[in-house]
Image (cartoon, helix red, strand yellow):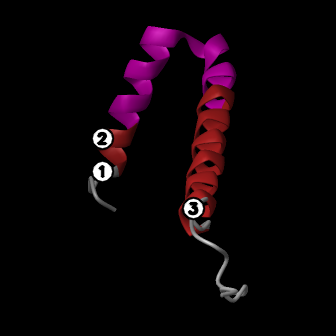
Amino acid sequence: MPFNLGLGELVIILVIVIIIFGVGKLPELGGALGRGIREFRRAQAGLDELTKMPHPEEPPADQEEKT
């Protein structure tokens, strides 16, 4: 884990989040965080697919040049 957070630190962070947002907003906040992570992964996968595509001016590798 990059941050090396222990149980005590996580409890303190959770208490601060509850104080700021309130108990009623936690499920809403968790859902929004999950959707954000999902969209980020989808966008990252889309970028990976775009980088694999050949450039428009280059012919595909399976087609031979006709001279």
Between circles 2 and 3, the one closer to the viewer is 3
On the image, which quarter does residue 62 sit in? bottom right
Q: Classify mark 2: helix, strand or loop.
A: helix
Left or right: residue 49 compared with residue 6: right
Identify which amino acid the numbered label 2 is placed on: Glu
Residue drawn 60% across and 50% down?
41
Residue tagged 2? 9
Q: Classify mark 1: helix, strand or loop.
A: loop
Residue tagged 3? 57
Mark 2 and mark 3 residues within 8 Å of each other at the beta carbon: no
**Among the two numbered marks 2 and 3 on one chain, the one whose residue lies closer to the N terminus:** 2
Residue drawn 39% across and 36% down?
11
Separation (CA) of disc 1 from disc 2: 6 Å
Q: Position of residue 64 (x, y in %)?
A: 69, 89
Left or right: residue 12 compared with residue 58: left
Separation (CA) of disc 2 from disc 3: 54 Å
Up-down relation of residue 30 to residue 64 (above or below) = above
Mark 1 and mark 2 residues within 8 Å of each other at the beta carbon: yes
Identify which amino acid the numbered label 3 is placed on: Glu
Q: Position of residue 47 (x, y in %)?
A: 56, 53
Mark 3 and mark 1 residues within 8 Å of each other at the beta carbon: no
Residue drawn 72% across and 85% down?
63
Up-down relation of residue 1 to residue 14 (above or below) = below
Separation (CA) of disc 3 from disc 1: 50 Å
28 drawn magenta: yes
Q: Position of residue 65 (x, y in %)?
A: 65, 86
Residue tagged 1? 5
Q: Classify mark 3: helix, strand or loop.
A: loop
Bounds of the magenta segment: 11-30
